Image (cartoon, grey):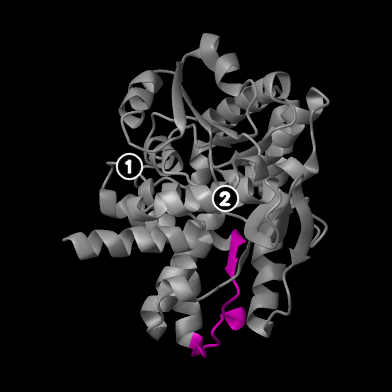
Amino acid sequence: CSSDLFFSLLEVEMLFGLTLRPSAMTAVTRSFSVSSQNMMKVAVLGGAGGIGQPLSMLLKLSRPPAMIDELAVYDINHAKGVAADLSHIDMPSKVCGYDGDEELQGALTGADIVVIPAGVPRKPGMTRDDLFNTNASIVMNLAESCAKYCPDACLAIISNPVNSTVAIAAEALKKHNAYNPKKLFGVTTLDVVRAHTFVGEKKGFNPMEITVPVIGGHAGKTILPLLSQTNPSASFTNDELEALTDRIQNGGTEVVEAKAGAGSATLSMAWAAAQFTYSLVRALNGEENITEYTMIESDTTSCKYFSSKVLLGPEGVQENLGIGSLSEYEANKLESEVIPELEKSIEKGISWFHSQ
């Protein structure tokens, strides 16, 4: 049992760039100067929900070089209870809970990063787009609050449909003259996590030791895994290409159906969002060569917002690293499926915002 726990913590360290084992904490404290890292506050909006709770727990586990000094857990209800529970974990991050609209300002003031998983989850038979009206309003209101109370923070949007909610958040920030394209992100990391898992299973790779780029959007056919760029290199038959692409694109539906009405992909999404948040913390603190696949304002394609490989830096986006060379199969899917669908979703979000 103890060896299994050790291996689990070691995996977390490798993925997040952290040191969690108690025996190593003293050494880490000595070797990592507190002065070399800025004080970091992260707010999780929707922190009492299915994604928010496990995400908040993973962020509570922070250590240098991705130390989160203060974790603000916000929700309409029950966030204080979640924060009280988390605060008993023997890790140094301070956790504060905030319930209701009247306490949102407190959660956001001073935040360096705001992660937004708030919203309603999918149920069997629903698409991410079916969540649009409810989640669009939630994201709009929260983004406008961010513009008022933490205008310089980085915003990481998880609430679906991400293909539309990123655009809605951008318009809300613009309304308050607080939009900075370097600091707005759609969290598409889960598509990459799934690609690593599914390709690793198929080809016998350790999923922690491979990279599979995933570009485009974060729903169905807008998700485009670039299997031709898998590293270590792997060959795929046409049937494997079709099957893996389809499974990566519809991984969320696989979980929704398996849970049979009891929820959507909450735990894997929390894991992916924690990876992204820790990368952003490290980059904001000046660590170099931190990259993630994430949806940003982009000129990579004709889509105003597009997920690709991004170099993160102290100001958020440092450089869009693009999509590399595509196979004929991938290029065809990009032009015929990804771009048309993603453009429609983006325009839907922008049009909805301006109709309010």
Q: Quadrant of the N terminus?
A: bottom left
Residue 53 shows in this picture: yes
> Does residue 20 lie above or below 73 as drawn?
below
Looking at the image, which is closer to me, 152 or 174? 152
Question: Where residue 175 appears, x then y in whole percent?
Answer: 80, 24
Counting residues from the start of the chain, the first of labels 2 and 1 encountered is 2
Q: Residue furthest top?
A: 102
Left or right of residue 194, residue 226 in this image? right
Q: Secondary structure at mark 1?
A: loop
Please give the range of residues in magenta.
222-238
Looking at the image, which is closer to me, 292 or 158? 292
Looking at the image, which is closer to me, 99 or 130? 99
Question: Where residue 263 appears, x then y in whole percent?
Answer: 32, 42
Q: Quadrant of the C terminus?
A: top right
Label of residue 32 in the image = 2
Q: Amino acid at mark 2?
A: Phe
- Residue at 79% x, 62% y is 301
What residue sits right under mark 1 in the picture? 263
Q: Secondary structure at mark 2?
A: loop
Left or right of residue 303, residue 235 in this image? left
- Residue at 78% x, 50% y is 304
- Residue at 72% x, 24% y is 147
- Classify 10 Å Cα crowding around label 1: few (below 14), some (14-19), many (20 and above): some
Q: Is label 2 in contact with label 1 (beta carbons under 8 Å)? A: no
> Does residue 21 lie above or below 224 as drawn?
above
Q: Amino acid at mark 1?
A: Gly
Question: Where residue 322 appears, x then y in whole percent?
Answer: 75, 66
> Does residue 101 lie above or below 164 as drawn?
above
Left or right of residue 212, residue 215 in this image? right
